[in-house]
Image (cartoon, rainbow, N blue to C red):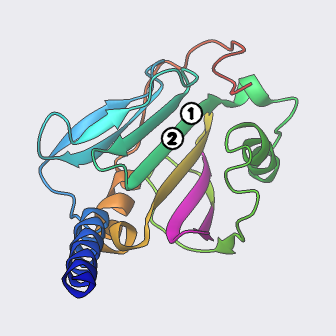
Amino acid sequence: MKRPFVFMLAAVSCMLCIVLASCGSSTLSGDLQSYSNADGSCSIELPTSEESSWTIKEGTPSSILDVSDSSDTINIRVQCVAKSQVQPLASDLDSYMDYALINTLGDLLADAALEEAEADVPEFITGSLIYDFDLSGDVKGKVLFMESERCYYTYLIMAVDEAYSGNESALLDSVLSLKETTEIPAADEESSGQ
């Protein structure tokens, strides 16, 4: 009597593993749709197959776009900050990266080893620092610190390992789709990430 129960439990466990693995490796598809941060200072385009493909996290500072796919295996965070807003704390791209690692990304990458990497960036970007990272629990990602003539950007891509590798091209294309609006919102405490 115990043997069929053990076999059935093993079969159910195996099926659950297959289902969870397939959720983590879904391929992004659909037409490109634009997503903006709340203050409208920047936007990106993501493949969107249906209305619920991407969820924008509510309650984030208005300068940050925090979007996840419907299966919650991919997360993209983009922050646009006018250089004038962080001038006393970030006078160049290196000091902005230090500022962003503490104020925007907080403890998220505290235990991650950042490895220098490469990626294409939009034409309006005048400088960039790009890193790959791995987090415990099979999460991979890329973080880009970029600057234009008027703004600094933090662009974070995180995904479950299979979702990252299976969608890397689309995720990096989203970086190239980054657009800066012509009007940068005035400095306020919320949009500076504090």
Residue situated in front as seen by the camera: 74 or 177 = 74
- Residue 39 horizontal/vertical position (percent): 48, 18
Answer whether labels 2 and 1 touch (C-beta < 8 Å): yes
What residue lies at 59% left-to-right and 74% top-to-bottom?
117
Please tell me whether residue 16 is drawn above or below residue 175 in the rendered image: below
**Quadrant in the picture for the C terminus:** top right
Q: Nearer the viewer, mark 2 or mark 1?
A: 2
Q: Does residue 131 belong to the magenta stretch?
A: yes
Residue situated in front as seen by the camera: 48 or 10 = 10
What is the crowding at mark 1: few (fewer than 14 residues within 10 Å), some, or many (at least 20)?
Answer: many
Q: Could you tell me the amino acid type at mark 2?
A: Val
Q: Pick out the residue farthest to the front.
A: 1
Please tell me whether residue 42 is drawn above or below residue 129 in the rendered image: above
Q: Say left or right for 18 vs 100.
A: left
What residue lies at 11% left-to-right and 51% top-to-bottom?
30
Label 1 sits on a secondary structure element that is: strand
Q: Could you tell me the amino acid type at mark 1?
A: Cys
Q: Does residue 94 belong to the magenta stretch?
A: no
Q: Dividing the picture into quarters, in which one does residue 103 lie?
A: top right
Mark seen at residue 31: none
Question: Pointer 1: what residue?
Answer: 80
What residue lies at 28% left-to-right and 40% top-to-bottom?
54
Q: Dividing the picture into quarters, in which one does residue 33 lie?
A: top left
- Per the rendered image, the range of residues in magenta is 130-147
Q: Pick out the residue farthest to the bottom.
A: 3
Q: Dividing the picture into quarters, in which one does residue 79 lie?
A: top right
- Residue 140 horizontal/vertical position (percent): 51, 68
Q: Main secondary structure of the magenta part?
A: strand
Q: Say left or right for 144 vs 170.
A: right
Mark seen at residue 78: 2
